[in-house]
């Protein structure tokens, strides 16, 4: 019966559920408005006699006798005095008078209902209370027994609010010894306890999460009020996962509906994210399929979290997945919205937090290249096959040995050398460290949060590293009671380093030593290629082990963001707000090759090295972004309606420009500035004799103007409705279609708030949500509506420029619009289990596709709104508290997302696969459908690959060469799956035993196919002829060994026609393997130093921990790649290859501490 | 208030414009703008036009042999060999017909926009020169379309479909144009050439169109109209010979001789006295070496270029002392011991780009004096001037270091002229058309990769390419070449 946590306004309970059910809602409504009605008109006669019976029971009898309903606040009756009385045939009024004599309560009667409430305390009583006040003191601790500061404490009957100090101690004056104290703290369940002497109050984290405030951008709601599909993730949860500066990587496995792919171990890899399925076509001008990023209410231009926010500053991340939440963001929100809330100061003593960690980053590849004995054995075996199978060789060389010795690409001496180039020179291990300090404090007037973070992290590629320095200052200043000013500032300076030495790792043969004979590190490395006509051919490449210290690309990225927000409360229910934000971003690339290295001296193809004597290339991009966002906020209750509304207007403007220049020939080795170089241009200019032209892409100006509004109604805290509309105008669109309107309607029903649910004790939350609405995707290409000429070509001489039509205007170009329906169900059981299920349908229409214009118009192609894609799926989140006890607890979070994607409409009814260019996707297919010629295994008798060839009559023939099937063109291609996973998700377990904490985060992806690029490009029997080493086959690749080999899955590697038969041709289904995986993404063990120890060392809190990322991965045994991390989907090249032979997801071991002062 | 800010902001939005571009009216506000737009139109005949044009024209002949299908992309393989195998794909992806058609009409749009902006009463010489050059380019573009999509002129030109004739920019609201007949299409080409001849004001280097360039092209167009050897159209043959006369007598071009001739393709076109018009590549690399050359490089096996080698048939026709043997050089393809020669006609300032892809700055010689002599030889023969024909043939024959031909006439002389054309103009985009326009079959007497010997008769439906399916979808008035 106690369900107060669901109610926002006046809390009423009724005597019995079934009685309440009989009450009509209209009755209740009237009641709520006119509570005080005279009772004198009621004349029923009551006869009742009893002794020391509880008030509840007494009223129950009155109800039966009078037929009146009884309504009361939930915390009132249990504490009422028992009733003894003797009534005979009195009026209801008289009876009630008697019943309430001496009670602290009063009653009123209205429309056949008796409403009971507390007596108002008179002035005199208050004065007496004040005089009688007693001081209660105590201590507040969290579930781990650590002191909690800033917990608010008040007496239930009113009075001053106090806060606990840094040791958790508090002292409060209450009116009498019976007072009830209310303890509350964000994220923790509010506790009510009778006042006592030296109280120790243990706060528990709020499992119900219903009271949690979720910021949805312009507005914030309690979780219980949400009508859309929103997931809120605390910054702490994120930081308890993988150790990185990439917020997106932290979301992987935690956020439902977000398919996140990180390829390889470079720190520059920011990852790709697709929310609820790919809903756009490939578009060279806009490769950002990720959600719109909003930081503290400000829409940003950022494409990824890493560049715009430091994870240390994140208070929470809220992911808006459906139109109910995203429509208010209009034309840019079709891919969802990620709302980041940064940390702020709070009232109380100054809090200082210090965190530091240090660790190792370890390369973690599942494959390796051949060593000397493997490589030479393979080459010898292949040469034997080649000799046996080539008549001309047998003519030239009478014996195999003669042939072998004359043409082999390794000498006898070479075989004594074994260099593991890949893991030692290219995929190296590294370190990482992170130091962060934050100070926050607040008074009634001023609150601030400041933070410094210094992070250094290496990737698992040679010289790959990031050094980040970030500062944030968030200030909230109350100027008057009505006027507040907030300032959020953030500076992030990232310095990325990467190598620009030789990166073609397959060109490094294991029998080649990195050192000269005298032991010194060589600056260049020979590579040997095969010639059937004689001795091996030698060409030289840069030695990365020597040059990597000199030759690097340094990218310096500065992001400054400042937002000032002025808020004016006109009345308690009406406020005005103006947020003005400036974002400056400078990306500066300095690519330097030192003349002391081979690669720095020479550039160009190996067969034709050009002497350049050092080279430098600079590229500088800067952009400014300004946004003004002005809101009117309205929030007022009308009876049982809690109505809130916003009306807003925004204007944004972006300007970006870029310049790049190259130079070579330097007399000052080590100087990486332009002034140190003597000649402009690159080796190509030297080779071809063309003059160097510094380039600067045309500056881009964009602007958009929007008006929007949202209305929310919460009725009786059980029924929620929300509607929003936004109208955007943008320079990105045609003059005839400049305005786009987006809208959403949604509703929620908190079923568990209904009276009829009160008997179902197990169900503490049950809620239905439904939404429908639209949101847009702005294509990146700008000013598509103008026909323009540009002087972009040269003809006849390199200085004679000509003008060409560079764009044919399309005045009708407009937004891509996604129409999304979402149905959600939230279930909370036993206050321990919370389940959210969201089912969605997204129809994305007017998708921009670069399509050919009619040829008679004469311009080859133009972006037109033609396509349509449908995504359907289910997102499921489950949070449980499996064990809750004093010393031990176990909580679990699980999420899984299913998505199905379908092409509904395409220009010309089909899309060619952009990567292989060999098959079409048709209407009805998944946009990432993969098709190939079906490989059906090895013929055990002769080791040849077998393919299915579909004859025109539909019969299937088995043939042993892919060329025979390819000749049939499209007919031979069969569906073999999709690069889109069927489902993906994550599973987190948190265990606490006393002061120990252990968390395990798994993530998984199932059902996506990946093109095995590692095999296609590198596992070729003849690659050695071109001087390439190949990856060593493992159990995933079992080449046919001889007649009768039925275990083999790959054809005979020593078949001279291996390539022609095409077992590993890009069109062979053998290459497309299951990329499903499950990964232990992070494991973390922490220990909280006990309070007793903390006291001695004068610390508020201290947690020490050890954490490990990407511990292990379970994958398909057929997959031959350094990592199963899947294909990025939706890329412009449609390159759905995975991580191939390069670095896998790095394993990181980190130890660290977090201290609070 | 919102309405007021809204309209203010609309002005803000409208005031923004893209940078570093000119709008059409700005472009044609000065004579220099016409010149620049015209220069841009030549650049429209760079790789995106040139590569499909070269592929379709050369791969359909018997001067080439495909040695490999080596690309990692099926689409590239199918594109490259589509014309070679006479598959004539109508898919936008599996052949180069679509690319050629769209590149042609894109180039034509640039031409028509310039012409649209020239007033009929224009007197400025710079603008008139731009007009003349664009008229020439329109004729050139349309004529190449006709060679690919229109059946040979000797076959019912009044009824066979030619090309849609577009002489002004069309927008999406225009009635989609249908194909004119072959005859009407040729008439438009001839009319444009004649108008351009009358409009030229000056002569630049041979990278630009000129009056005698227009005459040279006119001689070729009339030659294509001049019927077969058995059933010649003497009238068109005479017109062809007359146009050729103008070039030879008044054009001021000279044939290169001896060593200069041997170096023809390893020098810039601009100072070349034999070249009448070439698409110059000094400022833009040519992609053709990717198709033609395979220098012994590093990336053998994974990155292969140069799948087109001179055919054994072509090489066998070159006499031992033929200077033109010098246009082929040893170009080893590892593992290939039979087809070791490549043409060097596109190797001027050849270089090895990144990742084993090869480029050069070689010009594409569209018109040169040698062709005009051979045009006149054939035209004279068809109009009955055997002596003149033989004389013209010998000008080219002896220039190649060979002894003069004597006593030839009739079919033998005709065969000799066509053979000379084949040898002289190899890899310059003439080979297959020279058979079909004369009612002769294209015969390949050699195996070529996965294609057996092949004979294509001039009446075969496959003589003309299929039009891209995309064109047909967009324009219901276009009829397909049935096959």
Image (cartoon, rainbow, N blue to C red):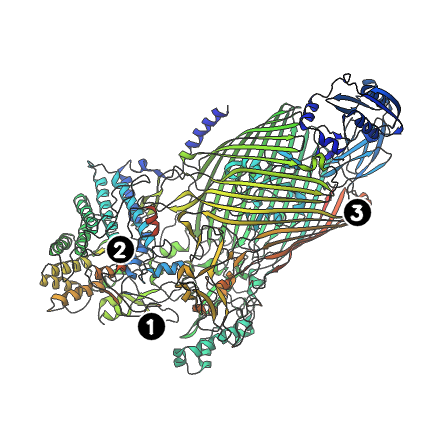
Residue closer to the observer: B190 or A947: A947
Q: Secondary structure at mark 1?
A: loop
Q: Earlier in the sequence, mark 2 or mark 1?
A: 2
Residue B382 image-quadrant placement: bottom left
Q: Do we see residue A1066 in this rendering?
A: yes
Q: Position of residue A11 (x, y in %)?
A: 73, 29
Subunit ID for the residue under disc 1: B
The answer to whether marks 3 and 1 mark residues whose Cβ atoms lie closer than 8 Å is no
Q: Position of residue B73 (x, y in %)?
A: 42, 59
- The residues tagged by marks 3 and 2 sit, at their Cα atoms, a distance apart of 84 Å
Question: Among all residues in the image, which is located at the extreme bottom?
Answer: A398
Q: Secondary structure at mark 3?
A: loop
In front: mark 3 or mark 1? 3
Residue closer to the observer: B267 or B33: B33
Subunit ID for the residue under disc 3: A
| Residue underneath mark 3 | A885
Quarter of the N terminus of chain A within the rendering = top right
- The residues tagged by marks 2 and 1 sit, at their Cα atoms, a distance apart of 32 Å
| Residue underneath mark 1 | B338
Residue closer to the observer: A233 or A1096: A233
- Mark 1 Cα-neighbour bin, 10 Å: few <14, some 14–19, many ≥20: few
């Amino acid at each position: 019966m106690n369900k107060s946590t669901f109610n926002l306004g006046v809390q009423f309970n009724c005597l019995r559920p079934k009685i309440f059910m009989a009450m009509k809602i209209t009755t209740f409504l009237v009641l709520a408005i006119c509570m005080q009605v005279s009772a004198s008109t009621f004349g029923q006669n009551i006869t009742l006699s009893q002794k020391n019976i509880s008030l509840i029971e007494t009223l129950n009898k009155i109800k039966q006798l009078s037929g009146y309903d009884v309504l009361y606040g939930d915390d009132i009756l249990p504490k009422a005095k028992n009733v003894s009385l003797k009534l005979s045939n009195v009026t209801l009024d008289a009876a009630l008078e008697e019943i309430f004599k001496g009670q602290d309560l009063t009653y009123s009667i209205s429309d056949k209902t008796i409403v009971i409430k507390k007596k108002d305390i008179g002035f005199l009583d208050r004065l007496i209370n004040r005089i009688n006040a007693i001081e209660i003191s105590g201590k507040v601790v969290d579930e781990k027994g650590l002191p909690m500061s800033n917990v608010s404490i008040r007496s239930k009957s009113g009075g001053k609010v106090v806060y606990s100090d840094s040791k958790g101690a508090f002292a409060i004056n209450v009116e009498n010894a019976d007072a009830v104290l209310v303890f509350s703290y964000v994220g923790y369940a509010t506790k009510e306890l009778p006042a006592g002497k030296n109280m120790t109050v243990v706060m528990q984290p709020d499992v119900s999460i219903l009271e949690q405030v979720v910021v949805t951008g312009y507005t914030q709601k309690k979780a219980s009020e949400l009508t859309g599909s929103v997931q809120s993730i605390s910054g702490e949860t994120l930081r308890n996962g993988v150790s990185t500066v990439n917020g997106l990587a932290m979301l992987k496995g935690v956020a439902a509906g977000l398919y996140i792919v990180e390829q390889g171990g470079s720190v520059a890899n920011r990852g790709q994210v697709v929310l609820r399925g790919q809903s756009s076509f490939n578009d060279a001008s806009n490769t950002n399929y990720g959600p719109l990023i909003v930081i503290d209410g400000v829409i940003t231009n950022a494409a990824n979290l890493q560049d715009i926010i430091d994870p240390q500053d994140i208070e929470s991340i809220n992911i808006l997945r459906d139109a109910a939440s995203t429509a208010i963001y209009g034309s840019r929100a079709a891919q969802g919205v990620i709302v980041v809330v940064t940390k702020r100061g709070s009232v109380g003593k100054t809090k200082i937090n210090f965190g530091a960690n240090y660790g190792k980053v370890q390369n973690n590849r599942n494959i390796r290249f051949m060593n000397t004995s493997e490589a030479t054995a393979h080459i010898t075996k292949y040469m034997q096959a080649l000799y046996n199978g080539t008549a001309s060789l047998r003519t030239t060389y009478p014996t195999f040995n003669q042939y072998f010795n004359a043409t082999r690409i390794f000498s006898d001496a070479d075989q004594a050398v074994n260099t593991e180039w890949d893991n030692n020179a290219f995929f190296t291990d590294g370190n990482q460290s992170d130091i962060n300090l934050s100070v926050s404090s607040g008074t009634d007037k001023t609150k601030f949060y400041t933070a410094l973070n210094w992070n250094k992290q290496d990737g698992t590629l040679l010289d790959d590293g990031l050094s980040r320095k970030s500062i944030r200052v968030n200030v909230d200043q109350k100027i008057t009671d009505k006027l507040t000013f907030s300032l959020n500032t953030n500076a992030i300076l990232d310095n990325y380093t990467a190598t620009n030495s030789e990166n073609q790792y397959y060109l490094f043969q294991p029998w080649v030593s990195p050192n000269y004979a005298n032991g010194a590190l060589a600056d260049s490395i020979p590579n040997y290629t095969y010639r059937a006509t004689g001795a091996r051919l030698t060409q030289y490449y840069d030695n990365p082990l020597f040059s990597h210290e000199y030759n690097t690309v340094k990218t310096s990225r500065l992001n400054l963001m400042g937002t000032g927000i002025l808020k004016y409360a006109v009345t308690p229910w009406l406020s005005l707000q103006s947020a003005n934000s400036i974002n400056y971003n400078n990306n500066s690339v300095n690519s330097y090759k030192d003349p002391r290295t081979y690669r720095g001296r020479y550039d160009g193809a190996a067969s034709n090295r050009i002497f350049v004597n050092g080279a430098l290339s600079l590229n500088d991009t800067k952009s400014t972004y300004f946004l003004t966002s002005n809101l009117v906020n309205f929030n007022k209750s009308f009876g049982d309606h809690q109505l809130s509304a916003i009306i807003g207007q925004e204007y944004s403007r972006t300007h970006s420009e870029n310049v790049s220049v190259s130079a070579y020939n330097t007399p000052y080795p080590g100087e990486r500035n332009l002034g140190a170089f003597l000649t402009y241009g690159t080796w190509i200019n030297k080779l071809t004799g063309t003059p160097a032209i510094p380039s600067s892409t045309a500056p881009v100006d964009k602007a958009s103007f929007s008006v929007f509004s949202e209305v929310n109604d919460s009725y009786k805290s059980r029924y929620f409705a929300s509607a929003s509309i936004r109208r955007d105008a943008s320079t990105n669109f045609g003059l005839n279609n400049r305005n786009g309107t987006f809208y959403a309607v949604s509703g929620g029903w908190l079923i568990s708030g209904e009276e009829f649910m009160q008997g179902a004790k197990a169900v503490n939350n049950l809620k239905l949500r439904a939404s429908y609405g639209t949101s847009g995707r702005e294509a990146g290409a700008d000013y598509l509506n103008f026909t323009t000429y540009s002087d972009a070509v040269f003809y006849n001489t390199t200085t004679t420029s000509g003008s060409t039509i560079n764009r044919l205007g399309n005045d009708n170009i407009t937004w891509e619009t996604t129409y999304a329906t979402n149905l959600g169900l939230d279930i909370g059981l036993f206050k321990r289990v919370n389940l959210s299920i969201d089912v969605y349908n997204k129809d994305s229409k007017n998708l921009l596709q670069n399509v050919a214009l009619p040829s008679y118009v004469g311009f080859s192609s133009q972006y037109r709104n033609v396509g349509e894609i449908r995504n359907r799926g289910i997102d499921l989140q489950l949070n449980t508290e499996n064990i809750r006890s004093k010393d031990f607890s176990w909580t679990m979070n699980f999420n899984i997302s299913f998505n199905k994607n379908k092409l509904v409409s395409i220009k010309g009814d089909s899309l060619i696969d952009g990567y292989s260019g060999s098959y079409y996707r048709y209407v009805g297919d998944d946009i990432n459908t993969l098709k190939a010629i079906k490989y059906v295994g090895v013929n055990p008798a002769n080791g040849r690959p077998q393919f299915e060839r579909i004859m025109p009559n539909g019969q299937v023939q088995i043939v042993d060469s892919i060329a025979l099937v390819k000749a049939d063109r499209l007919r031979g291609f069969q569906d073999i799956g999709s690069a889109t996973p069927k489902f993906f998700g994550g599973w987190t377990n948190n265990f606490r035993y006393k002061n120990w904490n252990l968390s395990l985060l798994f993530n998984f992806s199932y059902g996506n196919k990946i093109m095995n690029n590692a095999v296609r490009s590198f596992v070729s029997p003849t690659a050695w002829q071109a001087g390439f080493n190949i990856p060593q086959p493992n159990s995933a690749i079992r080449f046919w060994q001889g007649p009768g080999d039925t275990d083999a899955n790959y054809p005979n590697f020593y078949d001279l026609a291996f390539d022609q038969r095409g077992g590993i041709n890009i069109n062979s289904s053998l290459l497309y393997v299951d990329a499903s995986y499950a990964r232990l993404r992070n494991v973390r063990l922490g220990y909280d130093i006990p309070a007793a120890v903390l006291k001695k060392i004068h610390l508020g809190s201290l947690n020490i921990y050890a954490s490990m990322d990407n511990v292990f991965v379970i994958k398909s045994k057929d997959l031959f790649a350094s990592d199963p991390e899947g294909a990025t989907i939706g890329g412009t090249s449609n390159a759905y290859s995975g991580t191939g032979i390069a670095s896998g997801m790095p394993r990181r071991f980190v130890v660290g501490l977090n201290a609070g002062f | 208030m919102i309405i007021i800010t809204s309209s203010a902001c609309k002005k803000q939005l409208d005031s923004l414009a893209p940078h570093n571009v000119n709008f059409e009216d700005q472009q044609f506000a000065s004579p220099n703008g016409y010149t620049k737009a015209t220069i841009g139109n030549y650049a429209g005949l760079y790789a995106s036009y040139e590569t499909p044009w070269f592929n379709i024209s050369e791969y359909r002949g018997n001067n080439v042999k495909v040695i490999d299908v080596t690309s990692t992309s099926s689409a590239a393989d199918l594109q490259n060999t589509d014309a070679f195998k006479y598959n004539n794909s109508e898919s936008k992806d599996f052949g180069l017909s679509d690319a050629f058609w769209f590149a042609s009409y894109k180039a034509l749009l640039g031409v028509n926009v310039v012409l649209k902006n020239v007033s009929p009463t224009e007197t400025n010489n710079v603008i008139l020169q731009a007009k003349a050059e664009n008229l020439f380019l329109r004729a050139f573009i349309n004529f190449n379309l006709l060679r690919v999509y229109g059946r040979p002129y000797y076959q019912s030109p009044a009824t066979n479909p030619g090309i849609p004739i577009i002489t002004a920019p069309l927008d999406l609201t225009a009635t989609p144009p249908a194909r004119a007949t072959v005859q009407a299409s040729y008439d438009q080409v001839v009319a444009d050439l004649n108008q351009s001849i009358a409009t030229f004001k000056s002569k630049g280097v041979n990278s630009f169109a000129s009056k005698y360039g227009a005459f040279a092209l006119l001689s070729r167009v009339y030659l294509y109209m001049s019927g077969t050897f058995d059933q010649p159209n003497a009238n068109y043959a005479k017109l062809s010979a007359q146009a050729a006369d103008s070039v030879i007598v008044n054009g001021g071009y000279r044939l290169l001789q001896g060593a200069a001739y041997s170096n023809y393709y390893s020098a810039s076109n601009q100072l070349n006295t034999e070249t009448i018009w070439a698409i110059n590549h000094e400022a833009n690399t040519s992609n053709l070496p990717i198709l033609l050359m395979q220098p012994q490089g590093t990336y053998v096996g994974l990155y292969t270029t140069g799948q087109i080698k001179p055919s054994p048939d072509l090489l066998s026709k070159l006499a031992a002392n033929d200077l033109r043997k010098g246009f082929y050089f040893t170009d080893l393809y590892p593992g290939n011991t039979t087809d070791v020669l490549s043409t060097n006609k596109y190797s001027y300032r050849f270089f090895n780009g990144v990742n084993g892809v090869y480029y050069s700055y070689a010009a594409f010689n569209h018109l040169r004096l040698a062709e005009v002599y051979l045009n006149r030889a054939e035209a004279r023969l068809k109009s009955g001037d055997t002596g003149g024909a033989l004389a013209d043939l010998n000008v080219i024959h002896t220039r190649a270091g060979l002894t003069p031909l004597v006593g030839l006439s009739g079919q033998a002389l005709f065969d000799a002229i066509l053979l000379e054309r084949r040898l002289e103009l190899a890899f310059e985009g003439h080979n297959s058309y020279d058979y079909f326009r004369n009612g002769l079959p294209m015969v390949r007497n050699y195996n070529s990769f996965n294609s057996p010997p092949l004979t294509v008769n001039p009446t075969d439906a496959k003589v003309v390419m299929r039009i891209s399916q995309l064109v047909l979808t967009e324009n219901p008035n276009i009829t397909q070449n049935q096959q």
